[in-house]
Image (cartoon, rainbow, N blue to C red):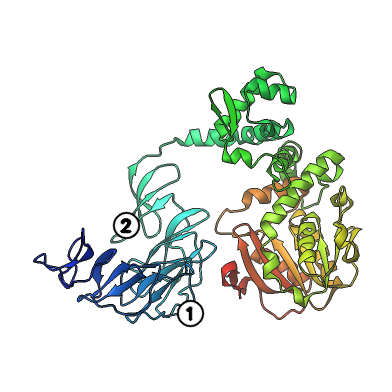
Amino acid sequence: MKYHSPGLAAVEDKSGSYHIDINGAPKYNKRFIETYGFYDNLAAVKDKTGWFHIHPDGTECYPSRYLWCGNFQEDLCVVKDKKNQYFHIDHNGEKIYENGYSYTGDFKDGAAVICNKDGLHTHIDYQGQLLHGNWFLGLDIFHKGQARAKDNRGWYHIDKSGQPLYLQRYAQVEPFYNGVAHAETFSGELLIINTQGQKVAQLRPELKKSWQKISSEMVGFWRTETLAIAARLHVLDSLPGSTEDVAQKIRLPSKHLWRLLRALWELGFVENKEELWHLTENGKNLVPHKDCFLSAAAIMWSDVNRIAWKNLTNIICDGKDKHHELFKSTASDENRTIYHQAIDGYAIEDFSALLTLVDWQQHQHVIGIGRSAKMLLEQALKAHKHLHALLLGEAYIFQPISINATLKSRYRLKTHKLYQPWPKMADAIFLPRVLHYWPDEQAIQILQRAHDALLPHGKIYLIEMLLNEKIPDGALLDLNMLAESGGRLRTLSQWTILLKQSSLSVQQHLKITDGVDLLVLNNHIKGTSLCNQKEIPLQNLV
């Protein structure tokens, strides 16, 4: 390794690892398993007792031992303890803040990147305090007051307050160098951009031409329908096997089955090895079983595409905000069972985090609205024996439905029109993905019914995807809700209007995932606009 101040370099020979001076002479007699360069006049080393730091004369800096040590930067160093927690220590080996993290980076200019157990990143200061409180999928240290960051849309740059410098997102960006940075778009275009995200120069054109990308998007229904057909015909759960073997199992002509399997191959759900078809990892996720709902989801989205979206042109031209009947409500029992499998599966995946976020000891009588509430209520009832729950909804959500025998004494189902009065008996009401099926007029009526059913000091848990006017995320789902039922997704400001008209106010806004927001409501208006509520990421909760 190269020489570091104070003129020492880490080397290794048959005797072990140690440091030499500029003349090649060993600086001390002791030997280690691993040694690294000196930073802040201290070097990370490893012996049979673990990792620690030494002075230039080979003496240890502190008695503590770690599973791993980094290098000192700005008088602080990253270490990993026996619990696999990362944190920073000072020259005395003392932890400088209370928390530990899944990973931490070096300090630079008073800030370091940490990674929490959910794989999300933010910046901390020397005291371990959050610099801005915003969390990202990927994050870099600050360079001249700006840092690379990644969200679900891609890479970009942020300032010291954690706010984006521009709206665009890229497949990759480099740190700014005197006001410009190297960036690559998702289409492969290579650019030089400025701090406003604007193109300064093009280094490489798009790898895929615009018309090709647009054409590919136009036939996106090919993918949806291919997966739905495979699910309906039980193709994937008949693998592995040759085309002839699978054809015999599911009683299909092999000629066309072979073409379907090739399409699934192109999509990455199967592969062909020595004339036998095998599932890929993605393909395994589409084989129906009790823990997998994606096969049912493929069929449901195919039906949404074929049935609901065919009327969307007329709905848009009509321009009226009006609710229309869900095609799922009049579906056959067989199809409705499939739709419910998909909805239940999404509910488990998206809402399970709520089980640990809600303080269930504050509640005893709970109302859940709609099919998505079913899974949430049942998991809560199993975990908290003091709870009693009522599931309300339109008739079709109960067709079919079953209740675990152990829950029957505490769990009731009731077919109910949501705009009709509800029983006034709840200290907690859950509305998971309910109101996005309704236009504003009916949504207000439902919120008013929830308000009236709430006992004093009760809470309403409203779970939806919130739109942001500055970015397009969720716009396609919003359009889908217009097609399916005349419903809509809403922004924070739009929720403000609805809640005020329903005599409700926001107590807390929690960001569960990129597609799931939780608004905790109560029926005591405190004069605080929802737009002023600070969004609290999941990892900030106490």
Give the label on residue 98, or none.
1
**Relative to 106, is 487 above or below?**
above
Classed neighbour count for the residue bearing mark 2: other residues with Cα under 10 Å, few (<14), some (14–19), many (≥20):
some
* Residue 280 showing in the rendered view: yes
Sequence-wise, the earlier of marks 1 and 2 is 1
**Relative to 347, is 334 above or below?**
above
Disc 1 to disc 2, how far (Cα)? 38 Å
- Image quadrant occupied by the C terminus: bottom right
Three-letter code for the amino acid on which mark 1 is drawn: Glu
Q: Secondary structure at mark 1?
A: loop
Q: Camera-side residue: 182 or 26? A: 26
* Residue 108 showing in the rendered view: no
Q: x, y percentage for residue 525?
A: 74, 79
Left or right of residue 62, residue 9 in this image? left
| Residue at 54% from the left image edge and 34% from the top image edge | 216
| Residue at 47% from the left image edge and 75% from the top image edge | 130
Where, by quadrant of the figure, is residue 96 drawn? bottom left
Left or right of residue 8, residue 335 in this image? right
Three-letter code for the amino acid on which mark 2 is drawn: Val
- Image quadrant occupied by the N terminus: bottom left
Give the label on residue 180, or none.
2
Q: Camera-side residue: 452 or 542? A: 542
